[in-house]
């Protein structure tokens, strides 16, 4: 065979290999075409496009007001509003909508009215089941529910009680399909606004001296605010204009400044109004998550926040609701605490002072909020205490500051620790190891078994000592270790680890009697498992030998 012929054969083989490789790696692309019937009755997301062979596409049919989704047709089938199709060829899909009923029918309305009347007095399983059978109807659109609930609450004997609000959150946000949720949410939204407006007027015109927690005006007004907050919390996507929440509260504050404004409220003259105001302000502030068009500064302007309160809201995203009861020193202390605690450790959104709002004792109403705490209004320096037992030197610190720190660390526990599987397991392990004996805890000024009964207080309780004086808290842990009780030292290292944020240093604090909080970066050394085995406090270095579970077995002192 000639050399030229051999070369031709080789070239031909190479070309064949290349063609085979290209064919083997080629992935065809298919077109997804989406349409709506009747036109304008809704839309589908995504609205079609080009997809690779084998790619799965999630389609959702979204009806406009007055229509409900019926079924899919074309190269798709089924009645759920959301489906997944696999692109194995070109596909044309149609989402079919039908006009939504504008009422639920007289028989069903009468039945549902009876069920809700019973539920409003307390949870009743047969009534819940009966109400569910009607409320779960996907074909009933927002107009039908708006009409029904408007008729229901127009009866002066029908009130928005705690029990009714509690029940309605389940079908509106949790149970049943997304279509049911959207229809109920849209149907209830304008009604809630109407109830708040009408009941605010009724409250102002009433003989307020005789109002109680169970009074219909109090129940209906407060629960409407709370239910609207639930819509905010779940970032209701079904509202056509979510900015309406912002606009509603802006007008409510403007029209009723004596109740919802920022001027000091006479809680004796206006019982329960402190809770109404607090819930309204919380709803307005937390509605920020619903829209990109409203900024913190605009909310601050609506609420007429000024000075330190405005700084706290704009810099840390924390709304302070105190009926103007906190003085400048107290506000400065709160700002200092928020500045000293790393923001990534907590998700705090609001701080209330219920005693200044008149929201305590027999007049206390529960507030619904994303993440908030309540503190006391004691003046700085009036409740000075030593948080340490006589095993270590005493250290006096301010009580107002400690309460604020304690409550903030509840949120460190609920957000940062709970969101970290390693930390959460370690906290549970420490509680199990310490058991019921109070001397096995850094905070031993409590009764035996306290932290086993209230584990949610465990981490926050440590903060009372750690923030008063971190070095004293370390000394207490070492002293207890030397007494044969290693758990307090393990607890100290756990707290220090949380405040290290996974880095090469942790934070130490000291708090004085005037509420001055000082923060210091303390270098740390970790072992191969990430546990803290050294603390470098100035020129003094503390070493810790740990077992395989991260528990201290020996201490190397400076």
Image (spheres, helix red, strand yellow):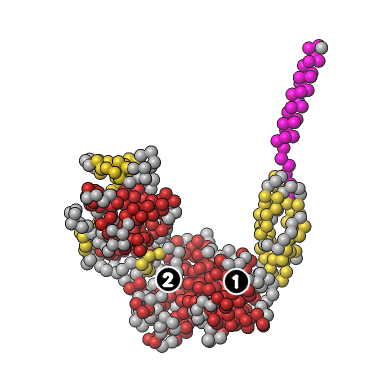
Is 543 colored magenta in this rendering?
no
Q: Is residue 294 above or below residue 538?
A: below
> Quarter holding the N terminus?
top right
Left or right, residue 380 beside residue 3: left
Residue at the disc numbered 2: 367
State the residue at coordinates (44%, 82%).
214
**Residue 488 visible within the image:** yes
- The stretch of residues the image draws in magenta is 2-31
For mark 2, give the secondary structure: loop
Residue 331 x %, y %? 31, 64
- Residue visible at 29% across and 51% down? 487
Identify residue for label 1. Answer: 184
In the rendered view of the protein, which quadrant contains the C terminus?
Answer: top left
Q: Earlier in the sequence, mark 1 or mark 2?
A: 1
Looking at the image, residue 553 sits to the left or right of residue 148; the answer is left
The x, y position of residue 191, in whole percent, is: 56, 76
Left or right placement of residue 319 versus residue 325 in this view: right
Q: Quadrant of residue 465?
A: bottom left
* Residue 201, image x, y percentages: 47, 83
- The answer to whether residue 465 of the structure is visible from this angle is no
């Amino acid at each position: 065979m000639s050399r030229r012929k051999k070369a031709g054969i080789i070239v031909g083989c190479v070309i064949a290999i290349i063609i085979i490789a290209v064919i083997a790696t080629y992935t065809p692309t298919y077109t997804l075409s989406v349409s709506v019937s009747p036109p304008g009755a809704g839309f589908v997301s995504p609205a079609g496009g080009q997809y690779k062979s084998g790619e799965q596409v999630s389609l959702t049919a979204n009806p406009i007001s007055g229509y409900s989704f019926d079924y899919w047709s074309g190269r798709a089938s089924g009645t759920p509003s959301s489906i997944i199709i696999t692109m194995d060829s070109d596909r044309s899909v149609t989402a079919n909508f039908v006009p939504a009923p504008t009422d639920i029918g007289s028989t069903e309305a009468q039945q549902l009215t009876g069920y809700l009347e019973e539920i409003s007095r307390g949870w009743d399983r047969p009534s819940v089941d009966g109400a569910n059978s009607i409320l779960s109807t996907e074909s009933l659109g927002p107009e039908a529910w708006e009409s029904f609930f408007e008729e229901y609450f127009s009866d002066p004997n029908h009130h928005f009680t705690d029990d009714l609000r509690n029940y309605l959150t389940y079908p509106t946000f949790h149970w049943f399909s997304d279509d049911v949720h959207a229809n109920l949410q849209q149907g209830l939204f304008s009604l809630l606004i109407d109830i708040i407006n009408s009941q605010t007027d009724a409250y102002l015109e009433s003989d307020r001296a005789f109002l109680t927690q169970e009074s219909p005006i109090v129940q209906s007004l407060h629960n409407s605010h709370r239910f609207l907050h639930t819509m905010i919390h779940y970032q209701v996507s079904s509202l056509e204009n979510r900015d309406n929440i912002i606009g509603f509260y802006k007008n409510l504050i403007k029209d009723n400044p004596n109740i919802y404004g920022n001027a000091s409220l006479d809680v004796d003259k206006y019982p329960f109004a402190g809770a109404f105001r607090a819930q309204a302000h919380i709803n307005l502030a937390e509605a920020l998550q619903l829209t990109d068009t409203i900024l913190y500064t605009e909310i601050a302007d609506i609420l007429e926040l000024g000075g330190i309160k405005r700084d706290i809201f704009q810099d840390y995203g924390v709304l302070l609701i105190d009926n103007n009861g906190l003085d400048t020193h107290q506000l400065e202390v709160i700002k200092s605490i928020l500045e000293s605690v790393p923001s990534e450790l907590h998700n705090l959104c609001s701080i209330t002072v219920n005693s200044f709002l008149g929201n305590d004792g027999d007049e206390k109403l529960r507030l619904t909020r994303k993440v908030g705490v309540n503190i006391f209004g004691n003046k700085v320096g009036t409740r000075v205490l030593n948080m340490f037992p006589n095993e270590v030197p005493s250290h006096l610190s301010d009580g107002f500051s400690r309460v604020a720190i304690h409550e903030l660390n509840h949120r460190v526990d609920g957000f940062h620790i709970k969101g970290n599987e390693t930390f959460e397991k370690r906290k549970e392990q420490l509680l199990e190891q310490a058991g019921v004996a109070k001397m096995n805890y850094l905070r031993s000024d409590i009764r035996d078994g306290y932290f086993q009964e209230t584990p949610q207080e465990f981490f926050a309780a440590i903060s009372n000592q750690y923030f008063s004086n971190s070095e004293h808290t370390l000394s207490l842990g070492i002293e207890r270790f030397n007494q044969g009780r290693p758990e307090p030292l393990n607890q100290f290292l756990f707290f220090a680890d949380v405040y290290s944020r996974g880095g090469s240093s942790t934070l130490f604090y000291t708090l004085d009697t005037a509420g001055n909080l000082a923060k210091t970066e303390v270098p740390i050394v970790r072992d191969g498992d990430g546990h803290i085995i050294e603390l470098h406090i100035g020129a003094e270095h503390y070493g810790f030998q740990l077992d395989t579970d991260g528990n201290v077995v020996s201490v190397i002192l400076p």
